[in-house]
Image (spheres, rainbow, N blue to C red):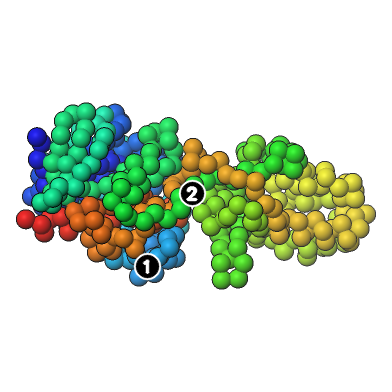
């Protein structure tokens, strides 16, 4: 029988960080993971450079950057462990980093630097790590604590921490084990769906734009109406199957099937005004003139769909010109779906925060804790989800350390 103060299931960002903090506070900690590779999501994040936090996060108003049925739930943990706290740790370990865009911080060298840092923190706390170790069953003991059946033997622990992440990117080992365990102990779940994911469109309807695959440009993008309207100014990427890039990844977390998204493909330009000016002064073909306002491939794709536009600027009817300006600055389209969990960076929904303490991350099931992505807390693109992993893990580890 292996007996521990804390067993953490999941050796990703949240699990490893929680282990290091708890271990350094004197607890006997075991981290187990069903995969033979630990922290794989950290390893591939940020193009291999790990966008480890965002310095613009406002912990006093987390609903700005986080999605949840209770967006205020994450405030407590985020205010107690801030981006600056994690930056201090990164600097303590001598990891070079840079700010790329809108507060997003990346390693200069590699995401491996963050993994090595997390493992060093675990070593400093005397943490034991076992990979390729799955959990077959979990039993709550009459006297408190839990018993776990694993291929590496029976484990007994006073506290059990679930840090198993979501369903995103199954090829690196994502499973729904954390949700199944929550259900086993009577905890509620919020509907899960892919988040931060590329959107797809019908093959026939998308045909005129499939040729734009690889084209990237800054856009305004939005979905929803009135108080549910959400807008981002980010870069868009055309793909063979639809749209991706930061703009679409961001809006995908707010988009619902059957609803539209709206794009301004020239957010810095007053297209109606500029095209009317061109009509008065230019002798160029409209396509050539338009190519000075938007990427040339985009201009060709739009002009090529309407013979009325395939003329010199002065010859294009006002109606056709206005229609083009409207189409480019307020392009409304309905995705047929998304690329699903295989391409999603996060999982929306998860363990219902109503059943978890925002102070300690302990669930209504005594001694059972949930941290990171497995919960119904999802951040924007740009380091917010990692900061939630660090903050929720830290809150949990601090709570665990008070139990003697």
Residue beneath the point at 24% across and 64% down:
359
- Say whether residue 129 is left or right of residue 257: left
Which residue occupies the foreground of this view, 219 or 360?
Answer: 360
Which residue is drawn at the image coordinates 84% and 50% (left, top)?
A: 286
Q: Residue furthest front?
A: 142
Image height of 69 relative to 164, above or below:
below
Whole-angstrom CA distance, mark 2 to mark 1, is 21 Å
Q: Tell me the quarter of the image containing the C terminus.
A: bottom left
Residue 148, quarter of picture: top left
Position in image of residue 298 (x %, y %): 72, 45
Label drawn at residue 72: 1
Q: Residues within 10 Å of mark 2 (few under 14, many from 20)?
A: some
The numbered mark, 2 or 1, whose residue comes first in the sequence reads 1
Q: Position of residue 280 (x, y in %)?
A: 88, 61
Q: Quadrant of residue 123?
A: top left
Expressed as whole percent of the image width and height from the top left, the position of residue 128 reads 15, 37
Checking the image for residue 173, the label placed there is none
Q: What residue is drawn where x is 55% and y is 41%? A: 339
Whether 62 is drawn above or below 344: the answer is below
Q: Please tell me whether residue 266 is drawn above or below residue 58 in the rendered image.
A: above
Residue 153 picture location, percent across and down:
16, 30
Q: Is residue 225 or residue 207 the one in the foreground?
A: 225
Residue 193 image label:
2
């Amino acid at each position: 029988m292996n007996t521990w103060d804390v067993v953490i299931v999941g050796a990703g960002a949240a699990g490893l960080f929680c282990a290091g903090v708890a271990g350094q506070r004197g607890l006997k900690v075991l981290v187990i993971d069903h995969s033979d590779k630990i922290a794989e999501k950290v390893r591939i994040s940020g193009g291999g450079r790990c966008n480890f936090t965002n310095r613009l996060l406002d912990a006093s108003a987390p609903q700005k950057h986080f999605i949840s049925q209770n967006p205020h739930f994450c405030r407590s943990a985020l205010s107690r462990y801030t981006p600056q706290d994690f930056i201090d740790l990164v600097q303590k370990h001598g990891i070079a980093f840079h700010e790329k865009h809108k507060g997003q911080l990346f390693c200069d060298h590699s995401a491996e630097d963050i993994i090595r840092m997390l493992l060093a923190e675990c070593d400093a706390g005397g943490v034991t790590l076992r990979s390729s170790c799955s959990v077959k069953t979990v039993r709550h003991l009459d006297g408190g604590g839990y018993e776990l059946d694993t291929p590496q033997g029976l484990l007994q622990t006073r506290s059990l921490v679930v840090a198993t992440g979501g369903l995103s990117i199954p090829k690196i080992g994502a499973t729904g084990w954390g949700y199944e365990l929550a259900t086993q102990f009577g905890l509620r779940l919020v509907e899960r769906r892919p988040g931060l994911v590329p959107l797809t469109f019908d093959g026939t309807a998308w045909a005129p734009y499939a040729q734009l695959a690889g084209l990237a440009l800054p856009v305004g993008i939005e979905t929803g109406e009135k108080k549910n309207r959400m807008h981002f100014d980010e870069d868009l990427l055309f793909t063979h199957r639809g749209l991706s890039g930061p703009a679409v990844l961001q809006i995908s977390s707010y988009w619902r099937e059957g609803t539209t998204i709206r794009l301004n493909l020239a957010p810095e330009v007053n297209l109606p005004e500029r095209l009317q000016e061109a009509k008065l002064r230019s002798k160029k073909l409209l396509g050539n003139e338009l190519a000075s306002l938007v990427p040339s491939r985009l201009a060709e794709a739009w002009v090529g769909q309407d013979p009325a536009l395939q003329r010199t600027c002065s010859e294009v009817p006002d109606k056709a010109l206005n229609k083009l300006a409207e189409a480019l600055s307020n392009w409304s389209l309905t995705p047929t779906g998304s690329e699903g969990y295989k391409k999603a960076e996060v999982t929306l929904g998860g363990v219902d925060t109503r059943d978890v303490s925002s102070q300690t991350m302990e669930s209504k099931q005594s001694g059972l804790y949930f941290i990171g992505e497995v919960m119904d807390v999802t951040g924007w693109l740009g380091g917010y989800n990692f900061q939630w992993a660090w903050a929720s893990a830290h809150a949990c580890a601090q709570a665990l350390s008070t139990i003697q």
